[in-house]
Image (cartoon, rainbow, N blue to C red):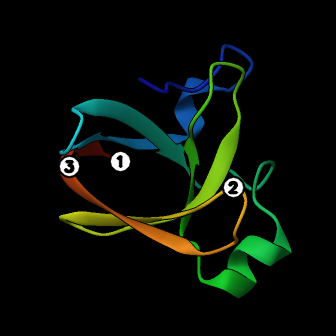
C-alpha cells in the first residue's frame, strides 16, 4: 500500500486505485507542489505515492489502466487498475 504521507494535505489527494495484479492500494495527486515541468513534458497527468515517506512518481491515470514512470529507466510501465474513487 502506498498512501500519501502525513505532510500532504488530504484535500490535494485526487483519488485512489487498486493495482489488480498484487491488489495494492495507491493514492494519487495533481498537487502542483510535487509536480514538475518534466512530468508535464512526459505526458503525466498525476503523481502517484509509491513509498512510505511520501515518495512520488509520474503517472497517467485512465479508467482501467495506469502508466507509471519507472524509477530507473525513465519509461512507462502499464498497470491494470480498479478505480476506487476520485474527486
Q: Secondary structure at mark 1?
A: loop
Q: Are marks 1 and 2 in contact (CB under 8 Å)?
A: no
**Mark 1 lies on residue:** 87
Q: Nearer the viewer, mark 3 or mark 2?
A: 2
Q: Which residue is mark 3?
A: 83
Q: Give the residue drawn at x 70%, y 79%.
A: 40
Relative side of 58 to 3, left or right:
right
Q: CA distance from mark 1 to mark 2?
A: 27 Å
Side of 8 relative to 83 (left or right): right
Tag 3, which secondary structure?
A: strand
Q: Quadrant of residue 41?
A: bottom right
Residue 10 percent coordinates (x, y) = 55, 25
Identify the image quadrant of residue 56. top right
Q: Quadrant of the N terminus?
A: top left
| Mark 3 and mark 1: Cα distance apart in space | 12 Å
Crowd rating for badge 2 (residues with CA inside 10 Å; few <14, some 14–19, many 20+): few
Q: Which of the marked residues, 3 or 2, is nearer the chain's N terminus?
A: 2
Residue labelled with disc 2? 71
Q: Nearer the viewer, mark 3 or mark 1?
A: 3
Instruction: Choose between 84 and 58: the one closer to the eye.
Output: 58
Provide residue 22's location: percent of width, then percent of height: 24, 35
The x, y position of residue 84, in whole percent, is 19, 40
Q: Nearer the viewer, residue 65 or 8?
A: 65
Amino acid at each position: 500500500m502506498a498512501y500519501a504521507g502525513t505532510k500532504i494535505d488530504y484535500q490535494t489527494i485526487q483519488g485512489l486505485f487498486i493495482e489488480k495484479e498484487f491488489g495494492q492500494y495507491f493514492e494519487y495527486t495533481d498537487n502542483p507542489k510535487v509536480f514538475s515541468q518534466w512530468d508535464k513534458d512526459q505526458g503525466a497527468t498525476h503523481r502517484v505515492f509509491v513509498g512510505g515517506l511520501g515518495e512520488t512518481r509520474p503517472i497517467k491515470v485512465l479508467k482501467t489502466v495506469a502508466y507509471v514512470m519507472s524509477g530507473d529507466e525513465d519509461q512507462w510501465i502499464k498497470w491494470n487498475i480498479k478505480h476506487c474513487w476520485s474527486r
